[in-house]
């Protein structure tokens, strides 16, 4: 229950940067765009804001939705006036990120800049039970306060604090923004808009503590609530990209998928963003050689499952923030579908200048595309011109193998995102698996969403960011109104199981399996 002398938030920042880099391609720097004649006396933030607005309007698929571009232009004008008063890199980042968050897209965001994230508060807010907010992590000297309900911070009602921090979070829905506030809300930069330095944390029982900011390089012994800890069972997170145990329980196989990438998908990512005829560097070759091939991995797993007469498969996606959806397609080919005609996601690609610059070789081939032609193994069903921009629709179907005939359960949680969430969604819509979540860590993934990001760098600040280039529609389009992935079962974590380190989802499956056998 302790974290000994760990720069807690520095590790978190690194993890967040890695998550973003998993999606990003080579970053393109945009030159300053011409300013409207009515806009004068620009500062660097105002110029970057114009570049950012122009970039989003030309690249993001949401701009093709009726009325959204006009609405964003109105917001851009407001932010332009606010930017007049920005005079520090931190305030510039906050304003630009707040504008970016208006897209309502968890994939479209400014990257975390390590130069700005040098101080933090050694606490973490727990917002899993919203609107109840608890203190989930604190210095060990304050461990008696961990788990207590927070009433206010510096006499500001806690829900007002949370709502203010949420303004800077790029999110598909409320649940995702709350999870990000919990993860990132300890960084001092996000509290600047509240004008706070030392935090006075007041609890529901009116007791208070004071928390001062510290450097990310400082070593502080932290204490976390048992609820915030990882399970100490078989299902605890592994360092491997993916890992399985067919002997987890009699007749039960457990697959933990922590990332959606392998040799094949990373090779495609690297080469697709380069000109035709590109040769890998020694560093790229070394990196690729360190990666497994997922097709070989799951082939061996299902072979072993078959030899041991496995009747239940658990796929754990709770630690998986996404990557390449091809891995999900490979896995689905082995699983029993209740609807053999179920297709994969339908997506719409916005072909923009930024997209072409990130995918030069693919761009060359797309210019020759027509309805029904195969491009990189995908069938583009139509080619549409909207407002002078090319938009392509693609409907991906999987080739059924269906070698496994048993029961399938998929575990999801607040970290399940992007292509990991897509895998769970397709499995749900096809009747492949039951989707389970821990009620204390609900899944925030939006099944119908934007994604497939392309990177950019703002010319004046140097801030890097990402914008989605595709909109994704789940197989069961009648459910696109659901703002997050709704599980088939939401399993509560009890105090006793938390203290014992038990995994409520694992216990549910094992108990259900035992009852079925009886």
Image (cartoon, rainbow, N blue to C red):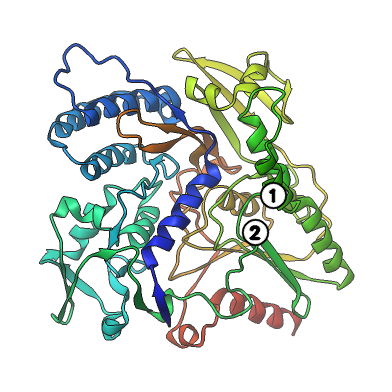
Res 439 label: none
Residue 413, horizontal then vertical, whole percent: 50, 63
Placement of the N terminus among the 4 image quadrants: bottom left
Placement of the C terminus among the 4 image quadrants: bottom right
Residue 26, horizontal then vertical, whole percent: 53, 33
Q: Quarter-wise, where is residue 465 in the image?
A: top left
Residue at the (65%, 53%) spot, across then down: 427
Residue at the (45%, 50%) spot, across then down: 17
Q: Vertical placement of 413 versus 462: above or below?
A: below
Q: Is residue 67 visible?
A: no
Do the CB atoms of the residues marked 2 and 1 lie less than 8 Å apart? yes
Q: Which residue is most to the right?
A: 307
Q: Quarter-wise, where is residue 228 in the image?
A: bottom left
Q: Which residue is most to the left?
A: 155
Residue 224, horizontal then vertical, whole percent: 38, 78
The answer to whether 169 appears left or right of 231 in the picture is left
The residue wearing badge 2 is 241
Disc 2 packing (10 Å; few <14; some 14–19; many ≥20): some
Q: How many marks?
A: 2
The answer to whether 295 appears left or right of 160 in the picture is right
The residue wearing badge 1 is 262
């Amino acid at each position: 229950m302790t974290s000994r002398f760990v720069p807690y938030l520095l590790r978190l920042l690194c993890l967040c940067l890695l998550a973003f880099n998993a999606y990003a391609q080579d970053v393109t720097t945009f030159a300053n765009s011409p300013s409207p004649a009515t806009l004068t006396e620009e500062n660097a933030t105002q110029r970057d804001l114009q570049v950012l607005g122009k970039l989003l309007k030309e690249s993001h698929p949401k701009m093709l939705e009726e009325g959204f571009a006009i609405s964003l232009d109105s917001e851009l004008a407001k932010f332009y006036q606010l930017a007049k008063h920005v005079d520090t890199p931190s305030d510039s980042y906050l304003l630009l990120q707040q504008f970016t968050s208006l897209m309502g897209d968890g994939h479209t965001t400014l990257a975390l800049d390590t130069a700005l994230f040098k101080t933090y508060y050694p606490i973490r807010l727990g917002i899993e039970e919203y609107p109840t907010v608890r203190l989930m992590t604190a210095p060990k000297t304050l461990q008696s306060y961990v788990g207590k309900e927070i009433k206010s911070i510096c006499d500001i009602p806690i829900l007002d604090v949370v709502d203010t921090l949420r303004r800077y979070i790029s999110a598909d829905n409320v649940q995702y923004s709350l999870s990000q506030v919990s993860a990132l809300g300890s960084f001092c930069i996000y509290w600047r808009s509240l004008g706070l330095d030392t935090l006075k944390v007041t609890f529901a029982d009116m007791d208070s503590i004071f928390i001062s900011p510290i450097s990310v390089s400082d070593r502080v012994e932290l204490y976390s609530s048992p609820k915030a800890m990882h399970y100490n069972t078989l299902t605890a997170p592994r360092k491997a990209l993916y890992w399985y145990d067919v002997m987890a329980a009699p007749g039960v196989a457990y697959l933990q998928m922590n990332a959606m990438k392998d040799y094949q998908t990373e090779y495609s990512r690297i080469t697709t963003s380069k000109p035709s005829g590109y040769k890998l560097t020694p560093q790229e070759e070394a990196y690729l050689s360190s990666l497994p091939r997922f097709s070989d991995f799951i082939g061996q797993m299902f072979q072993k499952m078959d030899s041991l007469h496995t009747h239940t498969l658990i796929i754990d996606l709770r630690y998986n923030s996404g990557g390449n959806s091809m891995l999900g397609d490979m896995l689905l080919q082995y699983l029993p579908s209740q609807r053999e005609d179920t297709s994969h996601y339908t997506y719409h690609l916005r072909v923009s200048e930024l997209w072409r610059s990130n995918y030069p070789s693919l761009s060359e081939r797309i210019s020759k595309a027509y309805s029904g032609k195969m491009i990189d193994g995908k069938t583009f069903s139509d080619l549409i011109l909207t407002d002078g921009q090319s938009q392509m629709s693609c409907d991906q179907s999987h080739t059924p193998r269906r070698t496994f005939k048993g029961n399938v359960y998929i575990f999801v949680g607040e970290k399940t995102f992007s292509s990991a969430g897509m895998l769970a969604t397709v499995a749900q819509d096809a009747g492949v698996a039951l989707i389970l979540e821990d009620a204390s860590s609900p899944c925030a993934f939006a099944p119908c969403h934007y994604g497939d990001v392309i990177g950019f760098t703002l010319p004046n600040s140097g801030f890097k960011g990402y914008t989605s280039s595709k909109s994704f529609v789940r197989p069961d389009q009648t459910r696109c109104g659901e703002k997050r992935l709704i599980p088939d079962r939401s399993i509560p974590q009890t105090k006793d199981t938390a203290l014992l380190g038990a995994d409520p989802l694992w216990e549910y499956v094992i108990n259900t399996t035992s009852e079925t056998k009886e």
